[in-house]
Structure formats: C-alpha cells, structure tokens
Image: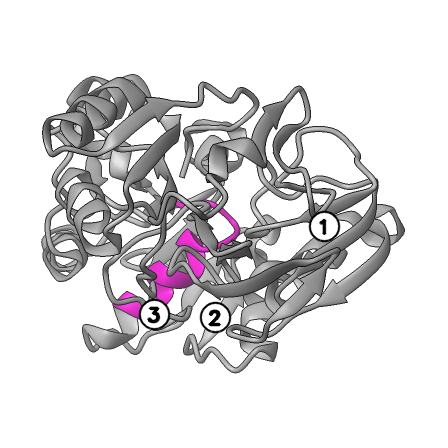
C-alpha cells in the first residue's frame, strides 16, 4: 500500500459494540443495537435485532425477518452481491462468503485503502449458497473458528457416504442427524441429493421454516417431510434431521432405535462426539479449515491480517511468520458452534 494512502487501522476500530468504520459511521455484526449496522449473515451471533438501520444481502434480510419479525431493525436495506453503495464517503460492497445462504464479506474502500471483513466463510463447494469470492485488499479481517493445524476437514462426500453406509448396515434403526437450522440442515440435504439419495428426509419442526425459506430462494432440497406426520415404524431406516440438542433429549425417544449422528466440524474432536452421545460423527463444516484459512490469507495478499472469532493465536503466528503484520482482535460474543 502506498504511504500516501490512509492506513486502515486509523479508521477501522474495535468498540464495545464490535468492529466499527469511523468515517462511514457503521458497525459490522454489532453485539448490541447501534444506529447503523452491516450484517454479514443470518446466524444469531452475527445478526442481532434492534439496530436502527441494517444493510445486508436479500438472503440475510429474509433470514433476519424470519427470526426476529418486527424487531429486526428500524429499516432494512438489501444490497445484492457486487453492487457498490456509498456511505458518507466510504464505498461498500458485499461479496459472497460461501458460509450460508446470503452470507457476505464486507469490502470497504476509503481514500485508496481497502479492507475486507470476511465474516464466517468456507471454501468448499456448496450448492445451497454462492461460493466464496477472494478479494485483494490492504487489510483482511478473517475468522478463525478452526484456526488450528489439527482441523483439516475431510471431503464432504466421504462423510455423507459414511451416513449412507450406516443406513445400509442398520436398516432397522432411525438415523437422527444433529444439524443447525440455518445452513447445516440445508447443506446436508443438498449433499444427500448429490450422492443419489432420493428418499424423503424427515425434519424436526425447528428446521422446517428455514428449509422452506431456502426453497423460496430457489435452492432445491428434494422431498422433505415433518417427522411428526410419519408413523413411528415408518422411520426405521430413514434419516431424520434435528437440532443438536434434540438428538439426545426426550424427543429422540419417540424415534425407533435412533442412531445419533452429528454434522459439525467439531466432530473431528472425539471427546466432543463422545460427550454428546454421538455414535456417528460426521465432519461437515460451514467454516474454513486450517489449510483453507492459511491459503485464503495468501490469496487475498493483504499487508495486514486481523484475526477474530476462534483460535486466533495460531493463525496470527502463521501470518506473522509469512511476513504479514497480524494481530488478534479478541472480540467477544461470537459462538463457536457451527
């Protein structure tokens, strides 16, 4: 970056409400209600109700409306990917993050300098959302949920094959898969369809609304049915998707001999799987793994890297060794569930 251009650290700061662009007067994924917010995606640790004004993609706004109703925000401004908007002399664009439907990176241009805030992202192909788009910048603010070298996710197809193989081995057991309502549920459905599984998949009631929203946005997910409409014996040898907490509570006892699976990047950690009573861990993540995080830092070619939302120290160390100026932001209020 030219020494005559403004340095991003002079106008991008952290506040108790989160990351703040001073000249634009907006926060990114604020932790508390603020006058002006830009929201990267619809997960509850990034999209919160009560802001006066919100700018986000149409998909994220639809998710927020579905979750928060009238409490979503005072006003909502949808912005399509790639479309620039000026906010008090700052140019802002949203580009795909590949995390969930509507997820976006925030590209901020001000006085010749560019900042990209990744939000949550992944680099794997996902038929349910637009793929991550790398963007060269001067400062890259990256997540680090799986920012340790131990986290190297296997191919998605192998994990889905494990589920389908288990179905063939245990045709009398209902396979209940723990998935988060936004993103993971729909991705597992799409991966099943890509693997040739054409049977109806049964959904816990908490997953129905968001799945219907994806389909309204043109994401085909194949035949899905509410689990409550199926006689108990009809669920033998079938797949039921449910929120993670439901897989081992009283609800699951209504399923015929349930075999508990869980789709999460955290299933790489055997102790986590065991602690949650998971018989079939499926390492399917909506976040970049270590190799993808480090490759992305190299690809965007920023002089400076700020790391947040996860295992910050290891990624800061890696970036520093590679010659980047790097530091941890240590923002609080962001969940590690995915």
At 39% from the left and 72% from the top, the residue drawn is: 200
Examine the structure image and report whether residue 182 is included in the region drawn in magenta. Answer: yes
Q: Using a 10 Å C-alpha cutoff, classify the residue at mark 3 as few (fewer than 14 neighbours), some (14 to 19) or many (20 or more).
A: some
The image quadrant that residue 18 belongs to is top right
Relative to 336, does residue 187 appear above or below in the rendering? below
Judging depth in this view, the residue of 26 and 199 nearest the camera is 26
Task: Tell which circle, 1 or 3, labels the residue nearer the N-terminal end.
Answer: 1
Picture disc at residue 190: 3
Q: Position of residue 97 (x, y in %)?
A: 40, 58
Between 175 and 126, the one nearer to me in the picture: 126
Pointer 1 residue: 67
Q: Which residue extends farthest front?
A: 4
Q: Could you tell whether 94 is left or right of 32 in the image? A: left
- Which image quadrant is residue 239 in? bottom left
Q: Earlier in the sequence, mark 2 or mark 1?
A: 1
| The C terminus: image quadrant | top left
Q: Which residue is mark 2?
A: 224
Which residue is at a point 83% across and 41% down the rendered structure image?
35
Q: CA distance from mark 2 to mark 1?
A: 21 Å
- Name the residue at 32% across, 36% down: 305
Span highlighted in magenta in the image: 178-191
Single out the mark in the foreground, 2 or 1.
1
Closest to the observer, 229 or 213: 213
Visible in this render: residue 311?
no
**Mark nearer the N terminus (3 vs 2):** 3
């Amino acid at each position: 970056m030219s020494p005559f251009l403004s340095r991003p650290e002079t106008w991008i700061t952290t506040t108790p409400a989160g990351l703040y662009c001073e000249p634009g007067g907006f926060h990114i994924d604020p932790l508390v209600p603020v006058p002006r917010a830009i929201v990267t995606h619809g997960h509850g640790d990034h999209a919160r109700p009560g802001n006066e004004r919100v700018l986000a993609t149409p998909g994220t706004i639809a998710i927020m409306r579905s979750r928060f109703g009238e409490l979503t925000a005072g006003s909502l401004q949808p912005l399509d990917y790639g479309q620039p908007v000026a906010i008090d002399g700052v140019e802002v664009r949203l580009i795909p993050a590949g995390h969930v439907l509507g997820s976006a990176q925030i590209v901020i241009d001000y006085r010749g300098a560019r900042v990209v805030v990744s939000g949550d992202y992944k680099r794997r192909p996902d038929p349910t959302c637009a793929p991550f788009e790398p963007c060269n910048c001067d400062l890259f603010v990256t997540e680090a949920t799986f920012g340790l070298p131990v986290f190297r996710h296997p191919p998605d197809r192998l994990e889905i094959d494990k589920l389908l193989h288990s179905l063939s081995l245990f045709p009398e057991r209902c396979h209940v898969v723990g998935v988060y309502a936004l993103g993971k549920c729909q991705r597992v459905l799409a991966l099943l369809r890509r693997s040739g599984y054409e049977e109806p998949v049964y959904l816990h009631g908490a997953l129905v609304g968001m799945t219907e929203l994806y389909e309204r946005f043109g994401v085909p997910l194949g035949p899905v049915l509410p689990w409550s409409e199926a006689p108990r014996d009809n669920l033998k040898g079938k797949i039921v998707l449910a929120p993670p907490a439901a897989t081992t509570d009283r609800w699951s006892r209504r399923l015929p001999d349930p075999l508990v699976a869980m789709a999460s990047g955290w299933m790489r950690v055997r102790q986590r799987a065991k602690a949650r009573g998971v018989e079939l861990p499926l390492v399917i993540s909506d976040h970049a793994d270590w190799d993808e995080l480090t490759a992305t830092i190299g690809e965007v070619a920023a002089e400076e890297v700020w790391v947040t939302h996860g295992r910050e120290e290891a990624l800061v160390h890696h970036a520093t060794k590679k010659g980047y100026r790097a530091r941890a932001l240590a923002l609080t209020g962001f969940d590690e569930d995915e």
